[in-house]
Image (tube, helix red, strand yellow):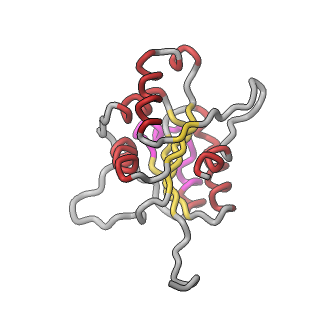
Amino acid sequence: MTEQDEKPPFLYVVVCAAGIAADVGRLITAAQEREWHVGVIATPHAMNGFFDTAAVEAQTGRPIRSAWRRPGDPRPFPEPDAVVVAPATFNTINKWAAGIADTLALGTLCEASGLGVPIAVLPCVGDALAAHPAYQESLIRLRGAGVRFGYPYGDEDEEFGWERAFDLLG
């Protein structure tokens, strides 16, 4: 295979409903600077005003996916070379760990982890929810499946570290 035949790597960005999702364009920019092509999959709740969907579609050049495609519809994205889940919420992490695939985002995560696709997760979970035993068990289960978690904040005053996802992917 020649360099001309090689396709650029494709990154799925899974966006959950957290206030910081408004800045997901920073993650997309960081991916594109690393020469990744990006497709965004959002939870249904994230699509309800948590980020500027039109801006993200313009930035990626692709529609945001949040619903299952119909039988016979073409796949809008190629298979992922990696997945970043950011911001990842308490609900998404726990449902994913339990194998619940009731949304496209969760189904995609369950499938990608089952296929061994590299997955980096930047949680956006408050201290009280992070202390919940179900959350701690979910982290253990997903880590056991090879999912890589990072802490997106260096200290209390630091902004959400979107770029840390790439350190997790290696």
Residue at 54% x, 66% y is: 9
Residue at 48% x, 41% y is: 147
Whole-percent x and y of residue 169?
58, 50
Q: Residue furthest front?
A: 144
Q: Residue furthest left?
A: 71
Magenta span: 42-56
Direction from residue 154 to residue 75 in the image, left or right: left
Residue at 54% x, 14% y is: 128
Q: Along the line of sight, which residue is nearer the eye, 130 or 60?
A: 130
165 in the magenta segment = no
Residue at 42% x, 27% y is: 138
Direction from residue 154 to residue 114 in the image, left or right: left
Among the 4 quarters of the image, the one containing residue 100? top left
Q: Along the line of sight, which residue is nearer the eye, 103 or 154?
A: 154
Q: Along the line of sight, which residue is nearer the eye, 168 or 129?
A: 168
Whole-percent x and y of residue 137?
42, 23
Whole-percent x and y of residue 78?
42, 65
**Number of marks in the image?**
0
49 in the magenta segment = yes
Q: Is residue 165 above or below residue 78?
A: above
